[in-house]
Structure formats: C-alpha cells, structure tokens
Image (spheres, rainbow, N blue to C red):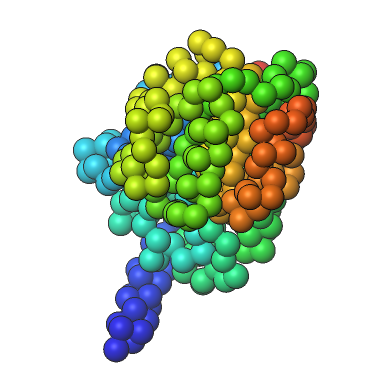
Amino acid sequence: MKRIFRGFLYIRDLFKLKRIVKSEKSKTLLNSKDVVILNTARNSDNKGDYIIMDYSLQQLNDLGFNCDKQISTHEYIASEWDDIEDNDYRIKIICGTNLLYGSMNHERNWKYPSDLRKIQNCCLLGVGWGTYERKINYYTKVFYKYILSSQYTHSVRDMYTYDKLRKIGINNILYTGCVTMWKLTPEFCKTIRTKKSNVVVTTLTDYNKDVENDRFLIETLIESYEKVFFWVQGKNDLEYISKLVDVNNLSLVFSLEEYDSCLKQQEIDYIGTRLHAGIRALNNKCRSLIISIDNRAREISKETNLPIVERDNLKNELLRYIFNDWNTEIRIPQENIRKWKEQFSYEGNKM
C-alpha cells in the first residue's frame, strides 16, 4: 500500500513539474553582479556548513558579487522569497555542500519553494552528490535541467558528481574540487607541518556512528598526544562521545570561533571524521588526517589527494599516520577554477 501511495505522489509531482517546465523559462541577466546566494549554512545545526559558506563568500566577494541577498536552503522562510519574482533574472548561486540527490521528489534537504519558477537560473559552486546512488529518476532529470542555468558553467566538487550530471545531459560543468580547498595550492601545502605535534584536535559524526572504531580513534589519540581537543561540530556529537570515553580526558571546543582559535594559537594536528573540520585545519597549516566515513571525503580524495584513511582500516593505519612524518600534497584543478571564475569577469570577458 505504501508503495502505491508513493507511486501516486511521484506521478502527481511529475505532472506538476511538467506544467511548470512548459512555461517560458526566464533568461539570466548576464554581466550582472546582482545575485541571489542560496546559503547552505543558515539555519543549519552543522558547523561544517558554516565553513563551506565562509570560503564560498570569500570567493564570491573576490569576484565582486553583491552577496547581500541570501536565502536559506535548510529551512523554507517565505519572507526570504518575497522579492523573488516567478521569472527572476538573477543568477542564484548554490554554495557548496552535498545538495544533489537522485530523487529530488523525495529528498528535501534543500527546502525550496513549490513554485520552481522562483529557483530558475541556479549556478553550482563546488556542490556535491549526497550519497552513492545507482539511479536518477525522471523527475530529478527534469528538475535539474529546469533549475540549473544553461548560460553559466557549473562547479562541482568531485568527479562522481560530474559524471552524474553528465549522464542526464547537463554538460556545462567543470570539476573544481570543493571551494574550501581552492587555496590549498602546491605552494601553500609546502607550509603545512609534516611532523607530529604534541596536541591534536578531533571530531566524530553523530549521525554516522561506528562505536568500535570511533572509540579506538579517541582512545588512541589520548594515548598518543599530550592534549586532545574535541570539537563539537554537530548538535549530538558531545552526547555520542560521552558514551565512548570519559570526556574529562578531553578539552571541549564548541563554536567555530573557538575552533579557529584552537588551530591558530598552537602547533596542533587534526585527526577526525568531520571532513570540513579537517579542511579548515589544512587551511590553517595544520597536519591533518580525515577519517573517511562516507562518499564525500572518499570521492574528494580520489582527485585531490586529500589525506584520508578509511574508518574500517583505522586499527591497521592510524598509528602509522600519527607517528610518521608525511607531506601534504593536495592537487587542485587550478585551470578549471580559473575558467569557472572567468565567466563572471565582464570587462572584455577576461579576468
């Protein structure tokens, strides 16, 4: 019965989408610095989203965009959409995060308005696919082709996302890596420490638990370092780690500001499951190892050489990473990043 009901909802949503698609699609006003920012951190309880938005806004401000108009993707707030016309000409820039899925009629991590005419002309900035999926349903193919701009080139964070979009006929895309990594050039990576520090900061992921390996991680860090900080990135991270170890053996860090201060004020390593906590540490020249627990770190690492170890292999590899010296050698697709930025340079169409 549930399958029949879901099938009915799918058909209903598809007919509704096709009616909207048949209406005339608005054109983006090219050569305009007046944009709408789809803010993937506002109303989020995951501080990693704020890291993504921080680096996204840095890049967009450097390109001269007026970023005053921002709309939350985590929560539908009607007042934020009030001044967006049905055929709004402004480009809407989706900033980072894993917002793309193969069944957008079901997946509502992105709280967009029911009138899809308001979200035409979207341009992706370092956006990724939410999870490993074999199929993209027909509704989603129509949805993406309707809302994504055909006049601008999109930036995606990994080749998995690139291939997914190409398979449904969206070809105006570039693999650029995650926007949080754009400053990790070969020259910058040479400044990242190679030797073990006496202090480490770690993270866990409350919504993706592995009690045995997560406990092993924290206990090993406590044994291997003089001091261990724990950054509470997600709302239930503290509750989770409290069930694994005695938190009195840890120094707790709560806000992003505290985390930044922790990274800047001392020589410190990062070893943890939170992807963007690790990338933030790299941007602060900290020797960093991300524990891979899902497709995000795994797919990003394939192209960029981001330092990761699979959580299932921790017991075999963690001590080697902790005590051995190693260089951080990130590979960033700088030419693709340059091309993506260049499309927004309107003075003779050159940067």
Residue 37: x %, y % from top left? 42, 33
Residue 200 in sight in this render: yes
Number of labels in the image equals 0
As drawn, 326 above or below 140: above
Q: Is residue 287 above or below residue 3?
A: above
In the image, farthest residue toward the left: 79
| Residue 38: quarter of image | top left
Quadrant of residue 74 in the image?
Answer: top left
- Please state, as top left, top right, bottom left or bottom right, where the C terminus lies in the image: top right
Side of 168 where 64 appears, left or right:
left
User: Residue 171 or 208: which is nearer the viewer?
Assistant: 208
Q: Residue at x 35, y 30 (%)?
A: 248
The extreme top residue here reads 265
Q: Quadrant of the N terminus?
A: bottom left
**Residue 70 horizontal/vertical position (percent):** 36, 31
**Image location of residue 53, percent across then percent down:** 46, 30
Which residue occupies the foreground of this view, 122 or 348? 122
> Taking the image as drawn, is residue 156 in sight?
no
Task: Give percent across and percent down for residue 203.
Answer: 47, 37
Q: Residue at x 65, y 42 (%)?
A: 318
Q: Is 92 or 218 nearer to us in this picture?
A: 218
Residue 220 in the figure: left or right of residue 163: left
Which residue is at a point 59% across and 44% down the rendered structure image? 291
* In-front residue for pair 97/239: 239
Q: Residue at x 76, y 19 (%)?
A: 190
